[in-house]
Amino acid sequence: MSWLTEYVRPKIRGLLQREVPDNLWTSCDSCSQMILIKDLEKAQRVCPHCGHHGKVKANERLDWTFDDGKYTKIELPKVPSDPLGFKDQKKYADRLKDAKTKTHLDESLAVAHGKIGGHDAVVAVMAYEFMAGTMGTALGEAFIAACRLAVLQKAALVIYTASGGARMQEGVLSLMQMPRTTIGVEMLKDAGLPYLVVLTNPTTGGVSASFAMLGDVQIAEPEALIAFTGPRVIQDTVREKLPEGFQRSEYLRDHGMVDMVVARPDLRATLGRLIGLMMNKPVAPSIEAA
Ligand SMILES: [Zn+2]
């Protein structure tokens, strides 16, 4: 008996586990079709069946945006982490600690520099996975640092936005980041450098009312929700049925709020071309072929 339980059973279990790993497949959030996780990652998390653009982590964005996936991340400025000593059901300090452990990020913005289509670029990515990409003092500081770096390197600044809005745990200090980030964008404009915004799902609240709407070119991923206040609240207030696709990328493009809607796999080539045009530099052949 002991030979069976101690030797044969673990062997069989090991074989089964090797053949059927439970994390091989996933289903699309939109069409519910099954997709191999490996295929989904290769397609930059765009569903091969319906084209739905799934959620993306900040580090993946950086990998896909820079030429050959090569970039240097910068350390973000340090700020007082809990200026108001805020507590709801949980202490804000504990929420921050949890978010850092879970995401391996310091804050809701990651900043890196490298090349896009052969052109120098600084890229800032909002991390929705970090407290819903909310904007607090640290994000404001990190955004200003990204602007300063772009000015210093005479490079373009690209930002991917994804946010639930202001970080309520920082009260008015969070709202103060709206004018601060706007001044950051002004620094780029004074230096004559391109500022490109890629709006991703969802971009809402104070972020959509500040730096997310100030791009020289406003790009959006397909079907992203881009709003100050979400459609449900508006519908309940005005008590009218909202038009189809209200506050989605395509609707905003058709009504002049967004310049172009670009599918995720085409973003790097589009950004490279735009930076080249705006900085009056030839476009690298590698990006043209992409
Ligand atoms: Zn799908």
Image (spheres, rainbow, N blue to C red):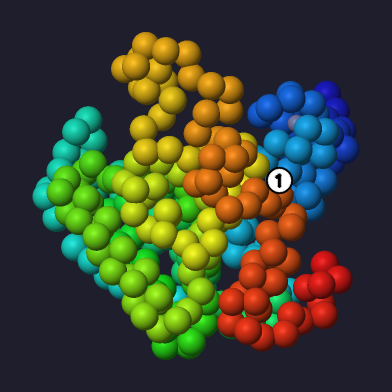
- Residue drawn at the location 65% of the way across and 48% of the way down: 261
Q: Residues within 10 Å of mark 1 (few under 14, many from 20)?
A: many
Tell me which residue sits at (42%, 54%) in the image.
Answer: 213
Residue 180 appears at what percent x and percent y?
Answer: 25, 64
Depth check: give the residue in front, 25 or 161.
161
In the image, residue 260 above or below residue 224: below
Mark 1: which amino acid? Arg
Q: Is residue 210 left or right of residue 93?
A: right
User: Relative to residue 258, is residue 41 drawn left or right?
Assistant: right
* 180 relative position to 70: left or right: left
Q: Say which residue appears at 28% left-offset and 45% top-offset.
A: 167
- Which quadrant of the figure contains the C terminus? bottom right
Which quadrant holds residue 67? bottom right
Quarter in which the N terminus is drawn: top right
Label 1 CB-ligand 1 distance < 8 A = no
In x, y percent, where is residue 192?
Answer: 45, 81
Depth check, front residue: 265 or 78? 265
Q: Nearer the viewer, residue 136 or 11?
A: 136
| Res. 183 visible in picture | yes
Left or right, 193 with reference to 121 = left
On the image, the x and y values in percent for residue 135 come to 32, 51
Disc 1: which residue: 45
Q: Considering only vertical position in the picture, is 12 above or below 126?
A: above
User: On the rendering, which quadrant does ligand 1 occupy?
Assistant: top right
Residue 229 at x, y percent in the picture: 36, 32
Local secondary structure at mark 1: loop
Q: Identify the residue at image location x=15%, y=49%.
A: 172
